[in-house]
Image (cartoon, rainbow, N blue to C red):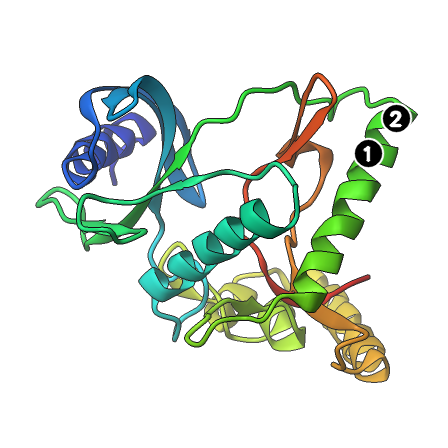
């Protein structure tokens, strides 16, 4: 079993390989996080000069066992491009690889399987999750409404692939955690905790069935829009981390 430090070191080597597919020279990487994805801040020389970027090395099967990860990540980036063009909201700007694609796939002998990677332009700002004021909550609510309005009228392109946040995803066998299917993860729970979770699952099946799946209830959502994923920069509200975006309840 590799230590956390060893895992990050191997992912860093893979990240450097991925950056070779982008028009970014003399990259300097700074590790950010190793969890759902492995992320690095990248200071590099781009065609417009020295700039800062976010490199994401995406975890395999992040969006479900039977989902093409490259298609899912491209779809996320397609929505970001559409939001930047048609909503006026401040969201991350995807950076295309040299070949014009929104993602690249990198492989390393030290990493078990190839990883889909993507690059976004860096966004500055302050996080006010620890001690938010009412103004932060009001502004976040306004942004959420604008996201919903855009998603409700956006014509989703052919091939758009994102997770559905339905009962099966939450309580069934759609997801993969640490290389283990969700069904096998459920079986790892102690009996008393599993019984509690089963009661929640049973209740939520009734609730979701009553809500239905019509366009007035379900649409394309950020799905992780808390104050930890919002940057405040002067009068600007910047929404980040669309990695969980998919089709779920407007509620």
Using the image, determine if residue 197 lies above or below residue 109: below
The disc label shown at residue 139, or none: 1
Give left or right: position of 114 versus 5.
Answer: left
Using the image, determine if residue 170 lies above or below residue 228: below
Residue 194: tell me if it is visible.
Answer: no
Q: Position of residue 168 (x, y in %)?
A: 61, 76
Q: Which of the 4 image quarters holds residue 46?
A: top left
Give left or right: position of 117 versus 218.
Answer: left
Q: Which of the 4 image quarters holds residue 212?
A: bottom right
**Residue designated by label 2:** 135
Q: Are marks 2 and 1 in contact (CB under 8 Å)?
A: yes
Task: Please rate how many residues cluster around mark 2, counting C-alpha atoms within 10 Å: few if below 14, some from 14 to 19, many from 20.
Answer: few
What whole-number distance in Å separates the C-alpha atoms at marks 2 and 1?
6 Å
Helix, strand or loop at mark 1: helix
Give left or right: position of 48 versus 196.
Answer: left
Q: Position of residue 11 (x, y in %)?
A: 24, 36
Task: Please rate how many residues cluster around mark 1, counting C-alpha atoms within 10 Å: few if below 14, some from 14 to 19, many from 20.
Answer: some
Q: Position of residue 63 (x, y in %)?
A: 45, 63
Which residue is depicted at the point 63% across and 71% down? 171
Using the image, determine if residue 82 lies above or below residue 56: below
């Amino acid at each position: 079993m590799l230590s956390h430090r060893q895992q990050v070191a191997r992912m860093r080597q893979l990240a450097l390989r991925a950056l070779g597919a982008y028009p970014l020279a003399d990259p300097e990487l700074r590790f950010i996080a190793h969890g759902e994805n492995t992320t690095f801040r990248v200071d590099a020389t781009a065609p417009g000069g020295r700039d800062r970027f976010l490199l994401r090395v995406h975890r395999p099967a992040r969006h479900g066992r039977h989902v093409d990860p490259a298609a899912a990540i491209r779809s996320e980036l397609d929505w970001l491009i559409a939001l930047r063009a048609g909503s006026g909201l401040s969201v991350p700007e995807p950076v295309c690889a040299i070949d014009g694609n929104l993602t690249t796939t990198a492989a390393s002998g030290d990493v078990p399987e190839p990883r889909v990677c993507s690059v976004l332009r860096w966004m500055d700002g302050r996080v006010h999750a620890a001690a938010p004021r009412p103004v932060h909550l009001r502004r976040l609510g306004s942004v959420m409404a604008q996201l919903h309005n855009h998603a409700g009228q956006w014509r989703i392109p052919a091939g758009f692939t994102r997770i559905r946040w339905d009962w099966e995803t939450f309580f069934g066998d759609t997801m993969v955690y640490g290389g283990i299917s969700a069904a096998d993860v459920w079986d790892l729970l102690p009996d008393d905790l599993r019984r509690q979770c089963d009661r929640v699952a049973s209740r939520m099946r009734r609730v979701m069935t009553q809500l239905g799946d019509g366009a007035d209830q379900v649409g394309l959502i950020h799905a992780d829009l808390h104050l930890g994923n919002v940057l405040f920069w002067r009068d600007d509200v910047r929404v980040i981390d669309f990695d969980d975006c998919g089709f779920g309840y407007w509620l």
